Structures are given as structure tokens and as C-alpha cells.
Image: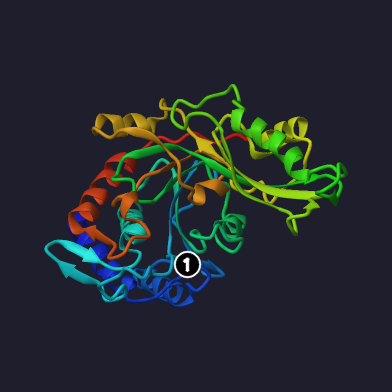
Amino acid sequence: MDIIEAKQSAINLLKTLITIPSYSREEVDLADYLQAYIESQGYNTGRIGNNVWIIGPDFDHSKPTLLLNSHIDTVKPSAGWELNPHAANLDDGRLYGLGSNDAGASLVSLLHVFFLLTQKSQPYNLIFAASAEEETSGKNGMELLLKELPKLDFAVVGEPTGMQMAIAEKGLMVVDCIAHGKSGHAARNEGVNAIYLAMKDVEWIQNAKLPLISDFLGPVKMTVTMIHAGTQHNVVPDECSFVIDVRTNEHYSNQEVFGILEDNLKSEIKARSFRLTSSGISPEKDIVKRGIELGLSCYGSPTLSDQAFMHFPSMKIGPGESSRSHTADEYIELQEIERGIDIYMQLLDGLVIEHFKE
């Protein structure tokens, strides 16, 4: 397979994948098709749940290992669709369909880049992985898949970035809080109003500024997004619950920020999860330098991806635009897939990757 054949094959595969609904946690039919397609190309596959992967030939444990990853699941179509979201309509160089942009174009591009790269010896081992449940950050997606793979040293995560390099990604932690007061009758001077107690914590959150600021992601952002208290107008509430949305940068783990909240808030707090961590790599990485030489730019991504589960260096880059994701009549330009494959090959062919040390 040469690069021209790879581009056409990638486009044809995406046309077929669009016709197979693969909503998050309902990806089995698409996973079945993709696994069969890969095996028809002469590769052995691995599979757990709806996650499918390939390990390149001649795996050498002395070499570092590069992961190429994108996801097979989509959100459900919004009510605004005028086209059939699973019809794969092609019009004037645009391929319309649910998941065409997010992240089908990245998926088929990276898969065919895997085929091209494994046709000759590389200074790294190569793995391609198609993950499930990315849109919901589910536990049966990348988090499950990583347990099945060998040690990984670097990952390229395919998401629609306009083929610009997202070298940092914000993490997410959701914190549930309860301020405890004491109930009483509103007509009398009794009780301890939990709303007033919560307000003090909310004010601290509003004004808090953590000192370590990321060059690409900016500061850690903490936002109170939900609040609830009271049962009726004449009862002083003894509880006030509120929710904090915390977006971390690469300088803080979710656990560290949670510890800061514990030290400064009077309310009872509980994190729903610490799983979705921030990530970032140095602009001095060889792959980033290659990208800059190609005219690509670096930025920090505010949106989550499967990078959140990768506790090793990674970079997010792929064809398409994030602004089209989850929108009605989603589409990808065919030339974006072709350009994506060109750039992936220029970035990765012969790339020197360092062994990652935890």
C-alpha cells in the first residue's frame, strides 16, 4: 500500500463506518466491523470489550513504544440534523455523517498511517488502538484498554485539531460539597443557615488563584456550577449542597487541588473521581520540533480526550475542527483526511522517541 492508496482506503473506510451507529457504550457493531477490516489487511488484532488494537510486527522490548489512538464512539445525533446522520452523504468534497469529524477522520487516518509505518523498520514499536466510551469517559474504554497493552512511551491521540498540535490538555475533577448548618424557624432568631455558610466557601472558590500557571492552559479554573438548599420558605436550611467544576493544568494533579480545597473550605467535600488528569509535554520534544518545522502551531486544549487516562507523554492532533464536533450535519473535508495522513507521516516516520520513566 502506498500513500495514495492509503488515503483512498481511509476515505472509503470512513464512509462505511459512518453507516454503522456507534453511540458511546453501544459500539459493538462498529468494533466488529473494524476488527474484521484490520484482519483482512493481514494483521492480528486484540480486543477487550469494544476496544480493538493491533501491535506492529517484530515487537522489540528494547525499543520505545508509540501508541496511535482514536475513538470509535460518538454522541447521539442532536435534533438539528437535516441530513441522515448515518447516510455518509458526500457533497462537493465534504463527507457528512455522525462521527465523521469527531473522530472518524482521525481514526481512519491513524489506522492507515499505522499500515504505512509498519511497512518498514522504525526506531520504535508501534501500536494502533481504537477505543470505546471516549465521549462518556467510561471505564470500559481507554482505562480498560491500557491494562492490556505493553508499556507505552508516547501516544498520538487523534482528535479534530485542524492538524495543529495540542501539547497540553486540561484535566477535570467534579467535587460535591455540603455545608452543614442547623435548622430553625425563619421567623425567629434560631438555627444556623447553611446557605450563608456555603456562600463563604463559594466566595473563596470565586477568588482563589493557584500560583502555578501553564503556558498553554493558563491557571487552574474552579467554578461553582450547581447549588441547592431549603425545603420551604419558613425553615432555615440545615444543608446547602453545591458542585465545583475544576479544570486542572499540568502543574497540579487532581489530588493536589482536592487537598487545597480541603484545607480552605469549611464544607464537607467529596471528589467524584480523580481519574481525568491533565497532561502536557515540552515544546522541546522532537515530534513538536518536527511539527513546528512543518508550520504547525502548539496550543493547550480545554476539552477532554482519552489523554486523560494516559500517564505517559502524549500529543493530540488530528484532521477536522473541534468546532464541528457534536453539531448537526457534522462533516469532514476529504482533503483534510489526505492532508492529515501526509502530516502524520512527516511527523512520525523515523521519529526518535525517548523511553518514558515514571
Residue lying farthest to the top in this orientation = 211
Quadrant containing the C terminus in the rendered view = top right
| Corner quadrant of residue 255 | top right
Amino acid tagged 1 = Thr
Q: Residue at x 25, y 73 (%)?
A: 83
Q: Which residue is mark 1?
A: 45
Question: Can the viewer see residue 348?
Answer: yes
Which residue ends up furthest to the left in the rendered image? 92
In percent of the image, x 44 and y 78: which residue is there? 29
Query: For mark 1, does the 10 Å Cα neighbourhood hold few (<14), some (14 to 19), or many (20 or more) residues?
Result: some
Residue 282 versus residue 349: which sits nearer the camera? 282
The percent position of residue 216, horizontal first and vertical second, equals 43, 30
Q: Position of residue 183 (x, y in %)?
A: 85, 50
Looking at the image, residue 224 sits to the left or right of residue 108; the answer is right
List x then y, in percent, for residue 351: 36, 37
42, 295: nearer the viewer: 295
**What residue is rendered at 78% in x and 54% in y?**
234
Report which quarter residue 122 is drawn in: top left
Name the image quarter holding the N terminus. Answer: bottom left
Which element is circle 1 on?
loop
Give the x, y percent position of residue 300.
Answer: 42, 35
* In the depicted structure, whether residue 312 falls above or below residue 226: above
Q: Is residue 15 above or below residue 219?
A: below
**Which of 51 and 75 lies nearest the eye of the viewer?**
75
Nearer the observer, 247 or 87 = 247
